[in-house]
Amino acid sequence: MSGDRLESPPVTGEGNGVVSHDKKTASVMVPSQRLRLHPNKDHMPESYEDLQLDFSPSVFRSLEKYLPPNMLSDSREDKVKFMRDILLKYLPHGERTRPLKRELYLMHPVTFFVPSFMKAINDNTEESLRSIISEPSPGVLTFEMLQPRFCELLVAEVENFEAWVNDTKFRIMRPNTMNKYGAVLDDFGLETMLDKLMNGFIRPISKVFFREVGGANLDSHHGFVVEYGKDWDVDLGFHVDDSEVTLNVCLGKQFSGGELFFRGTRCDKHVNTGSKPEEIFDYSHVPGRAVLHLGRHRHGVRATTSGHRINLLLWCRSSVFREIRKYQKDFSSWCGECVQEKKGRQRAFIAATKSELLRQDGESVA
């Protein structure tokens, strides 16, 4: 399959999972009660943990990023009132959804992760991390990560959220521009937990294996679940992620098919170039087992032929690396095609140098 081409456009980072308003709902809301469609990414939300609220404090913290710009400097009480009024409009009495599995919203590493993963993270050495990680193909890392209990809890929470969405006819944005099913975990209060997951557990691994793309400086995330099967998305075209590092963990359930296929890491300039034999790799999902790879590692999802598969994905980003990339004019050390071009130029330079030296020697003898 060498020489594969991209079958669909790369993910551009659009479709960030922000809740939208349908026309029927919007008609009963005054313009001042509208939220922004996209988050204020530079805004740091306040803490609401010390307040007695109708909804989880993490919901208010997540929602604050979508407040109108003129409200960001308002008092916390005014923000709470504004957000609460909107939540109550969407959640009439008797239909308010609350967290089903509250332990998910806190980070309890011992109950989340398998012992081998916890030990490697706690030891925090390159040797300890390498001891639990396999690299079946260059740049594709796999390791045992999540306990079955955590997978069950997260699946139950997602199903609870989606049941509420269906019952109330509530419209949500999906995880990205390619998946029609799934949900953005930050949108129902799991942002803080996912921040801890990235900072405390994914960044130490990325620091060792993906330092060249900002792995040591991951500072933001986009967390979501995707669902595949007969009644969900069936497959996913060839693409790259809007991330520096992507975590992909299968949560279950029973399924067949749905393999990930990888075809090499590329920069923007070379994203549509062919694949070399050593870059071709297929991976079969196992519940609880994680795959970690560069966002620019081209990949896709084969058809899920039976059952229902749910995966947790965490796109980890580095603002430092993204700023540096703006000024990069030469080769990318992490792009397979750039590396080959650089080696080609080096070989040509060496050959030309040797030829010139032989010519000069010949003239000296003459």
Image (cartoon, grey):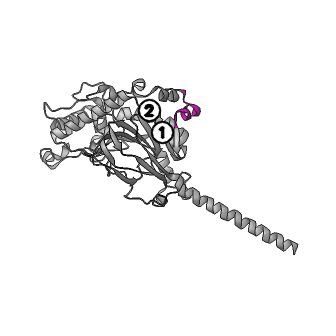
Up-down relation of residue 158 to residue 242 (above or below): above
* Residues shaded magenta: 123-133
For this orientation, the residue located farthest to the bottom is 366
Residue 272, horizontal then vertical, whole percent:
45, 60
In the picture, measured across the screen, residue 30 lies left or right of residue 301, that is left
For this orientation, the residue located farthest to the right is 365
Q: Quadrant of residue 107?
A: top left
Q: Element type at marker 2?
A: loop
Mark 1 neighbour class, 10 Å CA radius: few under 14, some 14 to 19, many 20 or more = many
Camera-side residue of 320 and 132:
132
In the picture, measured across the screen, residue 129 lies left or right of residue 236, that is right
Camera-side residue of 294 and 194:
294
**Residue on which disc 1 sits:** 142
Up-down relation of residue 249 to residue 150 (above or below): below
Task: Name the residue located 50 percent from the left edge and 40 percent from the top edge.
Answer: 206
Q: Which quadrant does the C terminus fall into?
A: bottom right
The reply to whether residue 74 is visible in this rendering is: no
Magenta span includes 124: yes
Residue 145 has which mark?
2
Residue 224, horizontal then vertical, whole percent:
34, 41
Q: Main secondary structure of the magenta part?
A: helix
Up-down relation of residue 109 to residue 249 (above or below): above
Mark 1 residue type:
Thr
In the picture, measured across the screen, residue 56 lies left or right of residue 330, that is left
Measure the C-alpha gap from mark 2 to mark 1.
9 Å
